[in-house]
Image (cartoon, helix red, strand yellow):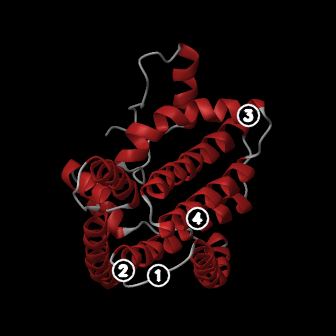
Amino acid sequence: MSSEKLTTFFFDSNKIIELRRQVQPYSAKEDLWSWYVLRRISIYITILFKKMNLSPNAVSWLSVLFVLLSGMLMILATPASFILAFISYNIGYLFDCVDGELARLTRKTSKLGYFIDMLIRAATLPVFLSFLVTLLILTNLLTLTILQAIILYVVIVSIIMSLLLPLSYDLTFALSEQTDPVQKIRNKSLLFEFSGFILGLPGFYVLLVICTIVETTTDLVMAPYLIAVFLFFLMVKVVLRAIVTIRTFKNV
């Protein structure tokens, strides 16, 4: 994908296209879902929020909230909650796109904004853990009431954030931001890009919606297997990421 390429809708006006050039520069960090789906929508949300005088940081906090909410909805482990989790996660991800666009459009960038952006990344960790709890519930290895599920998730979020809040602060004020070696590998080809999408949260939620629709219209049981496979590949990814990352230190 060229750095000059824009993600557009066929009905975009010239003004919208020009705004896209200003606030949607292509980044190697973009994944397929955000670039081809969310970025097409985000510019319109950015314009709306600018008219509402919302600050980029306020949008960033909303992003953290919706990403975290998707994990809580997963733990409720019902077809309806899975669909709502998909919606909640994508609203959070969409707002993560919007906050940067709004910051560039209004020229309001700050250390606080970078700090909250780090928290958005951190917010995905409780979501990953919610998948394990959801799998245990779906396979009848764990039984929770709605209240117990909510309390458990709040505790999980609190424990993780107790570590990641100070870590995010330290990274915000680090002297330099290193390039992720795994990101370099992913950007080498469309196959790696697509694999990253399928094995990441955006791809998981898309597949979860598909499985949920199939389950509600047939007698097939798919969600537990999807979650189990996703968690397995998550563990594989952690090992591979550790190997690739550690090897980069040989060149430092």
The mark nearer the N terminus, 4 or 2, is: 4
Q: Which residue is mark 3?
A: 50
Identify the disc placed on residue 140: 2
The mark nearer the N terminus, 2 or 3, is: 3
Give the answer, above or below, for where 126 lies relative to 23.
below
Give the answer, above or below, for where 186 lies relative to 181.
above
Q: Residues within 10 Å of mark 1 (few under 14, many from 20)?
A: few
Amino acid type, mark 3: Lys
Picture coordinates of residue 212 (x, y %)?
34, 53
Identify the disc placed on residue 68: 4
The Cα–Cα distance between marks 1 and 3, rounded to whole angstroms, is 45 Å
Give the answer, above or below, for where 251 lies relative to 182.
below
Q: Which residue is mark 1?
A: 143
Relative depth, front residue between 2 and 70: 70
x 66%, y 77%: residue: 165
The mark nearer the N terminus, 1 or 3, is: 3
Image marks 1 and 2: residues in contact by CB distance under 8 Å: yes
Q: Residues within 10 Å of mark 4 (few under 14, many from 20)?
A: many
> Is residue 109 at least partly visible in the picture?
no
Q: Place residue 37 in its image quadrant.
A: top left
